[in-house]
Image (spheres, helix red, strand yellow):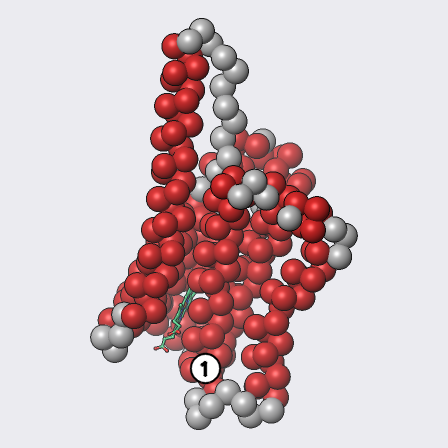
Amino acid sequence: MNKLLMHPATKPVIFLLCLLPFARLAYGAFTDGLGANPAEFLIRATGDWTLRFICIVLAVTPLRVTAKWNALARFRRMLGLFAYFYVVLHLLCYSWFDMGFEWGEIAKDIAKRPFILVGFSAFVLLTPLAATSFNRAIKAMGAKRWQMLHKLVYVIAGLGLLHFFWMRAGKNNFAEVFIYVAIIAVLLGWRVWNYASKRKAKASAGARGGEKPLRSTT
Ligand code: HEM
């Protein structure tokens, strides 16, 4: 698998796969194929894809460590940037179709509707992660500070779920929300378990006479 992941064609193929939802939405928009309410369809579909990409990014480290697919790490930045791409589209669709680009009304709506405020907070937090996802930013910030900042992805996932839950609460329709809650709980649960077992291994290595500490993989 690592060989396939390292193949020069794999990255462009994954890039094109990540663009497929956008292509499908653009095609639907130009061919009248988004149902009776295309604006609602676009807002919801881009919201769904943002949450899916956040789940995919969170799955990279567990998969890399448990399946030993180390080469997966080279796609993480691209997948994170796709999460940002879809949330920008989501925000644009909302600002355009729901609010007609009336910036004052948008500010009022964010302040008035808690589920929009929570979604907007997730977007604001995602922005520095996208802006610092380049090698030069990692160098400028130092690896430790960069890693700390990028732990915000857990808060963003939580806010994304709360936003989705709150939106669906009005319709009493939680089935999909709980699927995402379960996926994110498993992915975060794995990280807690992994952290705890590393600490344990480090402590017992220390007790045996100070072996080299293990590196973090978050
Ligand atoms: C990381 C950030 C965000 C995530 C993960 C996210 C995710 C979602 C999801 C999953 C949905 C529901 C889609 C469905 O029903 O299938 C949704 C709906 C929606 N979101 Fe977001 N969202 C985010 C940020 C935002 C922002 C910044 C805004 C606007 C300021 C926003 C406004 C909306 C609106 C208006 C809806 C549709 C509500 C409706 O149709 O009644 N979201 N979002």
Q: Nearer the viewer, residue 108 or 131?
A: 131
Residue 30, percent from left and from top: 61, 88
Apparent side of residue 75 relative to residue 191 in the rendered image (left or right): right
The relative height of residue 149 versus residue 144 in the rendered view (above or below) is: below
| Label 1 beta carbon less than 8 Å to ligand 1 | no
Q: Find disc 1 in the rendering and name its residue.
A: 41
Q: Dot 1: what SS?
A: helix
The relative height of residue 120 versus residue 2 in the rendered view (above or below) is: below
Rendered residue at 61%/38% (across/down): 138
The relative height of residue 160 versus residue 33 in the rendered view (above or below) is: above
Q: Nearer the viewer, residue 118 or 177?
A: 177
Rendered residue at 69%/51% (across/down): 4
Can residue 155 be seen by looking at this rendering? no
Q: Amino acid at mark 1?
A: Phe
Apparent side of residue 97 relative to residue 117 in the rendered image (left or right): right
Residue 215, percent from left and from top: 52, 27
**Where's ligand 1: which quadrant?**
bottom left
